[in-house]
Image (spheres, rainbow, N blue to C red):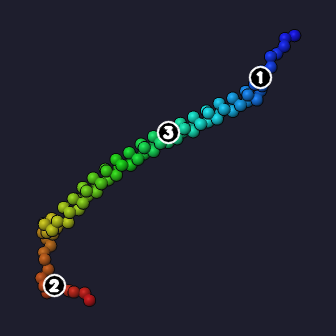
Amino acid sequence: MQKRKVSARGPSATVLWVVFIVLFMAELLVYSWCRVQYVKTGYEIARARREQQRLIAVRSELKIEEARLRSPERIRRIAEELGLVMPRPDQIVVMP
């Protein structure tokens, strides 16, 4: 019969090491998840900023287009094409 050497550490030391390793791996997983979320959020912020800049440019173009469409000269020209004329003073009725 072979005698088994009893470690001075005993089984509690092995359990302690297993717990330590499990906790270390859990910490690594949480850290990795946080970093992935950080990078993902950074990409979302950059994408939102690009979209904001694009929308600002579109708004600027639309303001220019609105000013062009509201031009009195353009309105006068369209009215003439439709055969409209300015009303005479006796044709104007002021509503109370």
In the depicted structure, whether residue 91 falls above or below residue 43: below
Q: Quadrant of residue 86?
A: bottom left
- The three-letter code of the residue at mark 3 reads Arg
Mark 3 or 1, nearer chain start: 1
Say which element carries label 1: loop
Determine the CA span between mark 3 and mark 1: 41 Å
- The three-letter code of the residue at mark 2 reads Gln
| Residue at image location 15% in from the left, 73% down from the top | 84
Mark 3 or 2, nearer chain start: 3
Q: Is residue 87 visible?
A: yes
**Would residue 51 be found to the left or right of residue 7 on screen?**
left
In the depicted structure, whether residue 88 falls above or below residue 70: below
Say which element carries label 3: helix
Say which element carries label 2: helix
Q: Where is mark 1, residue-wise?
A: 8
Residue neighbourhood size for the residue with mark 1, other residues' Cα within 10 Å, grouped as few (<14), some (14–19), many (≥20): few
**Would residue 85 be found to the left or right of residue 14 on screen?**
left
| Residue at image location 31% in from the left, 50% down from the top | 54
In this rendered view, identify the residue nearer to me: 4 or 62: 4
Q: Which mark is residue 91?
A: 2
Q: Where is mark 3, residue-wise?
A: 35
